[in-house]
Amino acid sequence: MFINREAERSHLEERYRSERAELFVLYGRRRVGKTQLLRAFCEGKPHIFFIATLSSDSDQLAEFSQEIWRFTHDSAPEGFTFPSWEAAFAALADLPGRPVVVLDEFTYLISGNKALPSILQKVWDATLRTTRLFLILCGSYIGMMERQVLGYQAPLYGRRTGNFQLLPMELPAAAAFFPAYSPIQQLEAWAVLGGMPYYLCVFSDGEDLFTNIRRRVLDGQGTLHHEPQLLLMEELREPRNYFSVLRAIAQGRTRLNEIAQGAGVGNTATTARYLDILQEMQVVRRAVPATESQPQKSNRGLYQITDAFLRFWFRYVHPHQGTLDLGLVDTVLDRYVRPTFEQYVGYAFEEAAREYVARLARAGRLALLPERIGGWWDRNEEIDVVAISDADGAVLVGECKWSANPVGTNILADLKRKAALLNAAGRWPDVSYALFAKAGFTPDLEARASLEGVLLVHVQDML
């Protein structure tokens, strides 16, 4: 199943039509769908699709050599291999036509041979850059790809002709995996799985959401039951320490000193390094109020788990692992998941609202051109959605309500009260309002919103 990714695929197609040598870099989180995108792109084109593994460097070279030979021959001689990676890369210059060569899991190749980027750079400069070769380097560990391939000091710096980072799917694309679900059910599934295509494919809209959660996540034999441990073990050298950091954040420790104390992996400097790498992987983020004009310097930052599935897993699986190991899956589902699920989805609903505002901005459908979109909080108050335009002197503030009752005028009045606190200094003369609701809005609120230009957003609008 290949859903969405039209923009990414069309970008690759445009590059392919250039007919000149291309060295393209695609990178992103594991499970985000890089391989599927590249396979879809390669359909109908002459190509070599080489997926690296953790086997020895010599074995990888031999396998790649045979792939190159089979491009122009029915089969490769037994035991055939080029004498070196330099020779193998040089052989790509002789491939006929407009060939696509994909080196998937390129970071595995680098881990087996640190000189590989330098070797490829040498061959690219000598011969490949004047051919019609379309070479794609694809890797999962974002930090390593950025340092070893994209970084200023990397051997291949300045050679690539294009690159992009493949991001998790936003809500509208994720919802397309569940056509049989209602809009509310689609958002709930996204709240559990996020935008990772692999996770979305595991669930089925032929079953209700709680059945999916029970079978695929809570059950010890479920496809996603051990996913967090597998993710960290595949990507990181010290998975236990990263696991402890994530557990501390999930337990409500959101500041650096709190996380260091709760995780027990070292002092704050050591913990900060772990957090930096988790941010590189886009598993964790440091959130600051949207009103902060220099977020990187703000001392109000709070660390949050950004990956929806990891957030779900650390809330409902990890704390009850012992009970689940005893086979008491239904007990965990009925005692812990069901009673708090609406509250859990409410948090994701706020994220969905912020993403929706960003999509409106990209489509030119907001009155302001935002520079920052996020939330706002102080010691006593918080606002779910804040979009700031310092240049326009404008701010959009929004409130999200994931409840069974329609939102009334009292919620709008409270939002205006909080907006006055946020804007006490009059920093943004132009203030607009938005409300997001699971169950819609009362007639009185709809009438007032029409008069005052308040944006009212239903769940189906966000899809």
Image (tube, rainbow, N blue to C red):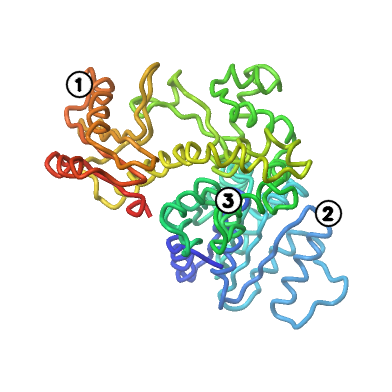
> Are discs 1 and 2 less than 8 Å apart at CB?
no
- Does residue 394 appear left or right of residue 214 in this picture? left
Name above or below for residue 359 compared with residue 237. Answer: below
Closer to the camera: disc 1 or disc 2? 1
What element does badge 2 sit on? loop
In this rendering, the answer to whether 136 lies above or below 410 is: below
Mark 3 = which residue?
210
Seen in the image, is 184 located left or right of residue 397?
A: right
Quarter of the image that includes the N terminus: bottom right
SS at mark 3? helix
Residue 106, quarter of the rendered image: bottom right
- Identify residue type, mark 1: Gly
* Residue that label 1 marks: 426
Question: Could you tell which of marks 3 and 1 lies nearer the N-terminus?
Answer: 3
Crowding at mark 1 (Cα within 10 Å: few <14, some 14-19, many 20+): few
**Could you tell me the amino acid type at mark 3?**
Phe
Q: Residues within 10 Å of mark 3 (few under 14, many from 20)?
A: some
Quadrant (top left/top right/bottom left/bottom right) for the C terminus? bottom left
Residue located at (62% from left, 72% from top):
47
Residue lying at 65% horizontally and 20% vertically, measured from the top left: 262
Instruction: Give coordinates of residue 426: x percent, y percent.
Output: 20, 21
| Residue nearest the observer in this picture, 95 or 451 | 451
What amino acid is labelled 2 in the image? Ser
Q: Is residue 215 visible?
A: yes
**What residue is rendered at 46% in x and 37% in y?**
347
Q: Is residue 153 visible?
A: no
* Labelled pair 3, 2 in contact (Cβ < 8 Å): no
Q: Residue 121: horizontal and vertical position, in percent?
A: 63, 53
Q: Which residue is mark 2?
A: 56
- Residue 87 x, y percent position in the rendering: 74, 63
Q: Which is more N-terminal, label 2 or label 3? A: 2
